[in-house]
Structure formats: structure tokens, C-alpha cells
Image (cartoon, grey):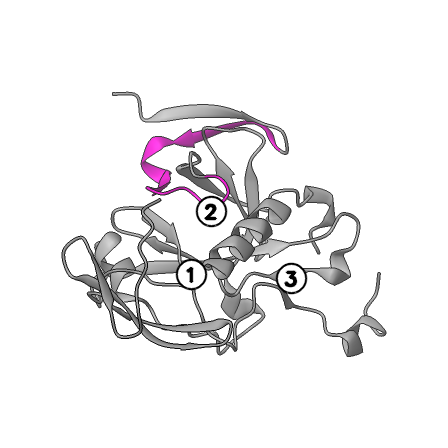
Amino acid sequence: MLVLTRKVNQSIVIGDGIEVVVLEVRGEQVRIGIKAPRDVAVHRKEIYDQILEENVSASGTDVGDVPE
Amino acid sequence: MMTSDAIETTRFGSVAFDVRDVVTLDEGFLGFPDAKRFIVLQHKEGSPFCWLQSVDAGDLAFLVIDPGHYVPDYAPDMPVDVAKQLELDEETPRLVYTIVTIPKGQPDDMTLNLAGPILINLENRLAKQVVVEDHRYPIRYKVFSQEKQGHSAA
């Protein structure tokens, strides 16, 4: 993992056309702005983790439990 | 080239299939990144439920259903990156499935993952599990609400 330190209003550019900017730091929260082309997905990581977990649970569904 | 193949599955025994029916997820599923090829099996004659059975791992299958069956106004926005990845344009025929989770022995606690629908391009059979961030569509949408549970037959 590349680790960089930024101040408010400083940015990081990723690849071709993705920019991550620190907008505000308030206590424990960091407000981050992301400029990315519309064809690049951007999501909070928690949602990926939660979907992954739910996929794992779902993979255990039994044939016998399916409603008629 | 052989067009038919078979997979030994844990739920359905040996299942024969036409390779042209295989649905391909280039990234697999979150949690199952190597499971990229699936076939769709109807659960039972007349049932709205289907199984997405992996043709690479016989023990992996997801119970799925058209989300519109239980959530008629389900209409998440389709992200641009997904349309591009699946080569979908406005007129391309497509199918949306939601993964159903049923805790063991508890069909009344069935939930739908409305935040992670599966989108299938019916022309090229490419598919993807789409991440939908919409407060209306939770990862565990309870199909049978608390109210109904009291009235439903076991």
C-alpha cells in the first residue's frame, strides 16, 4: 500500500483521471472528494465487505428451505 | 466443439447443460472471485425461484429470484461503469436477479440482497453483481415482515 500524507485541499491522482482530494478534517472525520470518470465505480469499502459477507451466508441456502 | 457438459453438484446431483447457456461473471462474486461461470436452474416447475449453479464448483449455488416478484417497484440506478463492462446499451435485453438468503430451517426469515443485484446481459451472457448504494435497498431486505410472520403458515 502506498502511504501519503496530505493537508486539507491537497490531492492525490490515481492512474488516468482519478483524483482524490482531502476537503476537510474535523475531529475524527475526514471529508474526501473523488473525481473519477463515470465508468469507474466508487463505493465505501464497508458496503463491499457487507455484500461479501452476505454472499457467503447466501451460499449456504438449502434446497429444502425454499418456499413452495 | 462440444456444446454440452455436465457438473456434479451437491444439491442437484449431476446436471447436464449446454455451454451456450453459461452465464459469465468476469470478476466472479464478492467472496467467490474464482467462481465465474454459472448456469441458471429453475428451482421447481412453476417456481419463481432459480438457482445460479456454479459450473466450476459443484458445491456453490445461489438461490435467486427476480426482485420484482417481492418488490414490484425495485428500480436501482444502473451505474455507467456496469453498462460499459457488460456491453449493455439501452436496448440490450437483460435480466436482474437478487440473491436470496434463507437461514437454515427458517424460511420465514428469508431476505433479499437488494444492494447487490446480479445483472445479466442476455445477448452475450456476461453478468456482474452490482453494488447499489441506495438507502431504499438494504443488503437484507426481509421479505416476510414481522406483521405477516404471525399469519403465515409454517
Which quadrant of the figure contains the C terminus of chain B?
bottom right
Q: Which residues are magenta?
A: B12-32
Residue B143 sits in quarter: bottom right
Check contact, mark 3 vs mark 2: CB within 8 A. no
Going by the numbered disc 3, the residue's amino acid type is Thr
Label 3 in the same subunit as label 1: yes
Can you give x and y, in whole percent of width and height, for residue B140 in the image? Answer: 62, 64
**Residue matched to label 2:** B30
Q: Residue at x 30, y 64 (%)?
A: A6
Residue B4, relative to residue B72: is it above or below? Answer: above
Q: Is A41 placed left or right of B134 in the picture?
A: left
Q: Provide the secondary structure element on which disc 2 rests.
A: loop
Residue B18 inside the magenta-drawn segment: yes
Q: Label 3 lies in what chain?
A: B
Q: Provide the secondary structure element on which disc 1 rests.
A: loop
Q: Is A26 placed left or right of B64 in the picture?
A: left
Query: Dot 1, how many residues are within 10 Å of its Cα: few (below 14), some (14-19), or many (20+)?
Result: many
**Residue matched to label 1:** B131
Q: Is B91 placed left or right of B100 in the picture?
A: left
**Residue matched to label 3:** B111
Query: Dot 3, how many residues are within 10 Å of its Cα: few (below 14), some (14-19), or many (20+)?
Result: many
Can you give x and y, in whole percent of width and height, for residue A46 in the image? Answer: 51, 60
Q: Earlier in the sequence, mark 3 or mark 1?
A: 3
Going by the numbered disc 1, the residue's amino acid type is Val
Is there any visible trace of residue A24 in the rendered image?
A: yes
Q: Residue at x 14, y 56 (%)?
A: A16
Q: Is A31 placed left or right of A66 in the picture?
A: left
Q: CA distance from mark 2 to mark 1?
A: 10 Å
